[in-house]
């Protein structure tokens, strides 16, 4: 998609560019519907501290500004990794959807008209006479 042109301080989009934004939005929206389980956090592999110990897996995440850790089995660790990766894909897609929505809404929906102040008149109004 080519970038919008700036003319007189306002972004202008062609009808084709707006259609392209809508198509990209719908594509991302459909991709979101087909995702498996979603989990935030990370899975850590903890190496054994002694030769007799085995590898352990933990899932950590933030809950109300505190780190919460849960021990996992190897099977759970694999499932959680997939869910975390799916969540990251969803977050990236949501970020892109927000960006597309922001761009399209600013262009399609009528906004406020801004008045331009005369710079000389504005600077005179702010000047204070000496001795006052």
Image: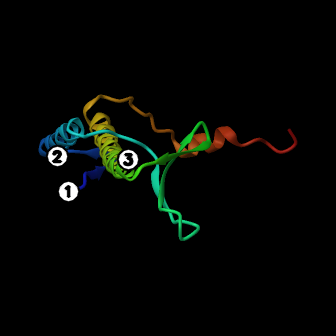
* Residue located at (42% from left, 34% from top): 114
Secondary structure of the residue carrying tag 3 is: helix
- Which quadrant: the C terminus? top right
Residue in front for this viewpoint, 57 or 80: 57
- Which quadrant: the N terminus? bottom left
The answer to whether the residue labelled 2 contacts the one labelled 1, judged by CB atoms less than 8 Å apart, is yes
On residue 39, the disc is none
Asked whether, in this view, residue 24 is left or right of residue 48, the answer is left
Taking 40 as reference, is 74 above or below it?
below
On residue 76, the disc is 3
- Count of marks placed on residues: 3
Asked whether, in this view, residue 56 is left or right of residue 86, the answer is right
Residue in front for this viewpoint, 119 or 58: 58
Q: Can you give x and y, in whole percent of width and height, for residue 62 in the image? A: 55, 43
* N-terminal label among 2 and 3: 2
* Residue located at (76% from left, 41% from top): 128
From the image, tell me which residue sits under label 2. 17
* Residue located at (43% from left, 44% from top): 40
Secondary structure of the residue carrying tag 1 is: loop
Q: Can you give x and y, in whole percent of width and height, for residue 6 in the image? A: 30, 52
Residue in front for this viewpoint, 106 or 64: 64
CA gap, disc 2 and disc 1: 8 Å
Asked whether, in this view, residue 15 is left or right of residue 7, the answer is left
On residue 2, the disc is 1
Callout in the foreground (3, 1): 3
């Amino acid at each position: 998609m080519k970038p919008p042109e700036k003319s007189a301080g306002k972004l202008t989009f062609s009808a084709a560019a707006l259609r392209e934004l809508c198509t990209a939005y719908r594509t991302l929206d459909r991709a979101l519907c087909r995702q498996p389980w979603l989990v935030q956090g990370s899975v850590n592999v903890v190496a054994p501290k002694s030769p007799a110990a085995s590898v352990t897996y933990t899932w950590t995440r933030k809950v109300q500004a505190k780190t919460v850790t849960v021990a996992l089995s190897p099977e759970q660790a694999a499932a959680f990794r997939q869910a975390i990766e799916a969540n990251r894909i969803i977050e990236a897609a949501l970020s892109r959807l927000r960006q597309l929505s922001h761009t399209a809404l600013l262009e399609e929906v009528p906004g406020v008209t801004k008045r331009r102040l005369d710079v000389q008149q504005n600077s005179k109004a702010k000047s204070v006479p000496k001795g006052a």
